[in-house]
Image: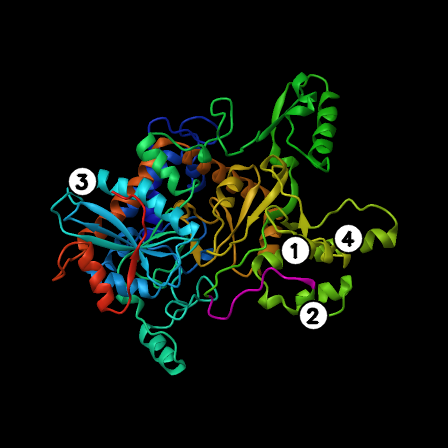
Amino acid sequence: SSDDYLRESVVQAMKKTPGWKDADGKNGRRKLNINDMYIFAPREEYERLRELYEKDPASMPSPYHNMMSPQTISSLKLPPLESKRSYIKQYDATHVITTLKHFNRDGFILHYSGVTDNFSIFLPESEEISQLTEYHAQKIDETLVRILRTDFPDRFDKGQPDFSVVLSAGDSPKVDCECVPLPHSREGKLPLPEELITKNISKGLKVCNRYDFSPIWNFASGYVNPEIIPTLITFPPWGYHHFECFQTYRFGYRVCNEFLESSTRHPFGKLYFGNHEVEIGSEESSDESQLPLDHDGFIEHSVSRDIQNYKGKSGTSPKAIPVWDYLKPQVMWRGSDFCFLLCVRKGNYRYNLKPEDIPGENTADGLMNGLREMWDALSPRWKAVTWSLEEEVQLAELKQAYGREFESFPWIDAKFTDKHRGPDETDNWHHFQELGGDVVSEHMRWEEAFVYKYHTDFGGGGGTTWLGVESKLALPGVLLHHETQAYDWFHEDLIPYVHYIPVSVDLEDLRHKFEWAETHQKEAKTISDAGTAFMRYMGTMEYWERMYDRLFLRRMGPTINTYNQGGLMPGEKSFLALAEKMKFPLKKVEINIV
């Protein structure tokens, strides 16, 4: 098959790579496999894989394709760059203004005037200019305009034609749900434009054809299925952890601290990898300071026992054991009680629950039964917290019945944190605790999260977590990644069952994936190692050079080249007059953009 052929091509290319070593550290001692390439030579493999991908996108497995086990892949894949471009056709100022009409918030127009050689930002006249709006405008000023002038100098120079494009910010594109309803699942089908138009007319809702949108530069989470908004071009979200890191690379010529390991070499690095091995049989191994933070002593007890057993053997020499063997076999999650994907077709998910929102009696049993009754309407985060509550209650009942402590612990430990929460919301958590349900916990540092074998991330308002995935991939545990309808820019390089274990949108397979990992420890650790290797690769200049070229040069260029001034007179005044004529007046965000 084409997949087998391309896999073998990558393997053969890797065998020719200078310095290639197999898992035993020696050249060519055994047959290579796909997983080895991700763990032991990610830099070279990714570059060659990407080359093959761009040469033959139709037959190459997409970034979401599982190259190890095709039977388990999602039927949806991220499209290659070339198919993205096919949606970008000639457009003009009228298309841009019409597209912005269908945003309910967090949409802008970036306009360039060749007459004055200035950039401007426009908002709908009816929209209030908030602090967040000013922040986004400032980011455009500091970075995006600078990128356009630096990397497309011939296009943005005095005397050149005008240019305009819609920008999307926030956590996801805030386009009217009537125009782009999200499917309920990752693989769900979307209605055809004509079907949606007919339906909306019958219900008196907004009418639009998403295929008529102008290009949208989306600085937020994007959608896996390109049919949701065909002209959406996804870039890194605004913020220090994403877009500003590309600013650091392009104009500071270095990798930003957020993707560097915290170490003596990089004292300001933000990523915590920790020690992925524990040495036993040496004098240093008796020093418990080498162990990660461990609030319940789980790792400390196991390691201390093995150290003593090993020291008791004669003729032994020190050896390193993967810390994986000592990690707590429990799914761990901490995070906020936040919304999830507002435009899902079957209705919004419930979040920010209070005791009075839950049906049933005000008892521990009533609380659990009420949450179960609401199950289909709960957000993924609330489902995980509910599972955790159920496990805790059952374990507490067993301990009370038998009068002793059990060695076992719940398979999942999912809690909301009260960090950055207001007093009223904190009171809500206290009410839950009074009913016998512990839904809140203190914020957990990465050094503390280190001790868990299974991590997960549950999507928020945009369907993803902007800070969780990369931090959890760096840890020695394995990531059970929440595969939603959305993705972030670096997810394009992540492959299920290679870098993470995929979990469905509604979490119905979360317990099953945990049990699979428990019975397939070798495979799970291999996946964990590959995820960590990927994060180390993200800390290299080579990675940022490749991603900058892909995201900013190859994706912005076609949009810039397909804008058509048409019969509109150049200049800012003509653009604003056109908006007035279209009965969608705009106003300028007053910020110093040059």
The residue positioned farthest toward the bottom in the image shown: 202
Q: Earlier in the sequence, mark 1 or mark 2?
A: 2
Q: Earlier in the sequence, mark 3 or mark 4?
A: 3
Q: Position of residue 398 (x, y in %)?
A: 82, 54
Q: Tell me the residue at 45%/52% (across/down).
A: 69
Q: Tell me the residue at 47%/57% (across/down).
A: 484
Q: Earlier in the sequence, mark 1 or mark 4?
A: 4
The residue positioned farthest toward the right in the image shown: 403
In 3D space, how far apart are the residues under numbered discs 1 and 4 (Cα atoms)? 30 Å
Q: Which residue is the site of mark 3?
A: 153
What amino acid type is highlighted by mark number 4? Leu
Marker disc for residue 424: 1
Q: Which residue is the site of mark 2?
A: 359
Q: Which residue is the site of mark 4?
A: 395
Q: Position of residue 578 (x, y in %)?
A: 20, 64
Q: Tell me the residue at 40%/46% (across/down).
A: 135
In 3D space, how far apart are the residues under numbered discs 1 and 3 (Cα atoms)? 52 Å
In 3D space, how far apart are the residues under numbered discs 1 and 2 (Cα atoms)? 21 Å
Which is in the foreground here, disc 3 or disc 4?
A: 3
Name the foreground residue: 563 vs 534.
563
